[in-house]
Amino acid sequence: MLASLIGVAAGAESLRLKSTVPLPGVKGRFDHFATDTNRHRIFVAALGNNTVEVIDAAAVRRLHTITGLHKPTGVVFLPEANRLFVANGDDGTLKVFDGTSYELIKSIGSVDDADNVRYDGKTRLLYVGYGEGALGIIDAQKIEQAGSIKLKAHPESVQLEQTGPRIFVNVPDAKQIAVVDREQRAVIATWPMEKFQANFPMALDEANHRLFIGCRKPARLVVLDTATGQAIADLPMSGDTDDLFWDGARRRIIASCGEGFIDVWSELEGKFQLSQRIATRSGARTSWYSAVAGELFLTMPERSGAAAELRMYSVSR
């Protein structure tokens, strides 16, 4: 029997707005984030502006703007190499920048409609969702493509197991989640998403064998058992979600939704309760959450004369 929303949690840790970084001149929508915890930097793909905005989270200011991009989407920063990888959906490239000078080091082609990027630190391989259905495999040291894995349609969110070989991939146009074995470099299972569709964001609770899926049609948070692929819960959520996070230490889920809300659920005795619904701005659907720091970074696109900005939220009691 599927679990249901059982009320609003009392006394749960909550998010509160801490600071705001204005981003005047940045037009259009935002996409994904990367972070540099050593230097407190946030890299934000400003897709509609064809830039990556570099933010100093400690000083609460914009440090730099990387230009010359073409609909930047996924971003990954590798501190050990001091390199920033930026996927470009318009020209099908993965561009690599020096993390200090922001100068272009290399550009890899042949990843049409490049989107989400994930890094496997053990193998030092990057996985890039691209095209009509594939995960590109990039050798992060050699900065060259090392292979690809075929999918049924264009991939959205990608999550990697840390203690196992599987990759979970949202494939909304195929109405499924693809389960990939990254050692075999092949799809080993597909889990249908028929009742709840437009599955874009995803978060993985590896310790408890759960996968959290944000769906837009209808707006619903679906919880799957990663051992079976079966749904074990579904909860109503705000519309147009694009980023979703699981905080295992605090037992909560956070989703940023373009309808104009941040939804936060807390887990109590195995059931999820809505603990917060924070009003934001229409189109504010992309974010990044640091469970270690207890901080959420949310992009606010320009709307109705209000300039674009980055909002920073912190955990409070």
Image (cartoon, rainbow, N blue to C red):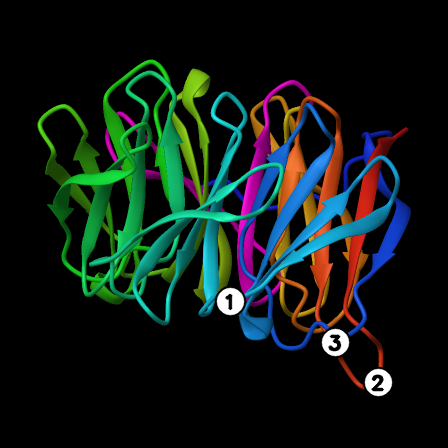
Residue, disc 2:
305
Residue 288 place in picture, x, y as percent = 63, 43
The foreground one among 34 and 285 is: 34
**Given this view, does label 1 or label 3 mark the residue nearer the observer?**
1
**Given this view, does label 2 or label 1 mark the residue nearer the observer?**
1
The foreground one among 233 and 102 is: 102
Q: Is residue 305 magenta?
A: no
Amino acid type of the residue that numbered disc 2 sits on in the rendered structure:
Gly
Which segment did they paint magenta?
222-250
Q: How busy is the neighbourhood of tag 2: few (under 14 within 10 Å), some, or many (20 plus)?
A: few
Q: How busy is the neighbourhood of tag 1: few (under 14 within 10 Å), some, or many (20 plus)?
A: few
Q: Are marks 1 and 3 in contact (CB under 8 Å)?
A: no
Mark 2 vs 1, N-terminal side: 1
Residue, disc 1:
68
Q: CA distance from mark 1 to mark 3?
A: 21 Å
Quarter occupied by the N terminus: top left
| Picture layout, residue 77 above or below residue 287 | above
Q: What residue lies at 13% left-to-right and 38% top-to-bottom?
A: 189
Q: Is residue 239 magenta?
A: yes
Residue 295 location, quadrant: top right
Q: Which mark is residue 302?
A: 3
Q: Secondary structure at mark 3?
A: loop
Quarter occupied by the C terminus: top right
